[in-house]
């Protein structure tokens, strides 16, 4: 049981680093995605599937 908890902790930490990296590359809120991934590690897969966020310019 201890081994499985340690493995889950390692996977969670790696997933948070990955989500932070992906959020920065996709112009998303890195802090929010890191927090959500720490709560539920598979959330990083949703971020991985999202396209980059683009900044829309207002037309005058």
Image (spheres, grey):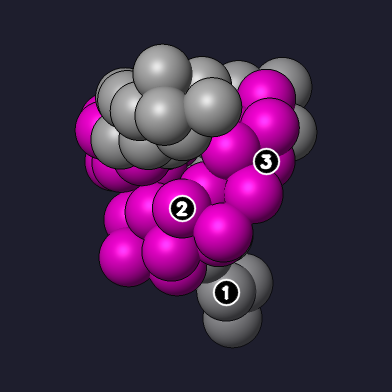
Q: Quadrant of residue 26?
A: top left
Residue under the point 57% across and 74% down: 58
Residue under the point 41% across and 29% down: 2
The single residue placed furthest to the bottom in the displayed view is 60
Residue 1 image offset from top left, x and y in percent = 54, 27
- Main secondary structure type of the part rendered in magenta: helix
Label 2 Cα neighbours within 10 Å, binned few <14 / some 14-19 / many ≥20: many
Residues in magenta, as a range:
16-45
Residue closer to the observer: 36 or 60: 36
Residue at numbered disc 1:
58
Mark 2 or mark 1, which is nearer the start of the sequence?
2
Q: Quadrant of residue 39?
A: bottom right
Residue closer to the observer: 25 or 15: 15
Q: Is residue 3 visible?
A: yes
Residue 32 image offset from top left, x and y in percent = 45, 67
Residue at numbered disc 3:
43
Q: CA distance from mark 2 to mark 3?
A: 9 Å
Residue at numbered disc 2:
38
Q: Is residue 55 visible?
A: no
Residue under the point 67% across and 40% down: 43
Mark 3 or mark 2, which is nearer the start of the sequence?
2
Label 3 Cα neighbours within 10 Å, binned few <14 / some 14-19 / many ≥20: some
Q: CA distance from mark 1 to mark 3?
A: 32 Å
Horizontal side of residue 59 vs 34, given as left or right: right
Mark 3 or mark 1, which is nearer the start of the sequence?
3
């Amino acid at each position: 049981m201890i081994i499985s908890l340690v493995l889950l902790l390692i996977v969670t930490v790696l997933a948070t680093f990955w989500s932070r990296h992906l959020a920065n590359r996709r112009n998303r809120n890195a802090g929010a995605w890191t927090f959500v991934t720490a709560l539920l590690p598979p959330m990083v897969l949703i971020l991985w599937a999202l396209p980059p966020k683009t900044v829309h310019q207002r037309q005058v």
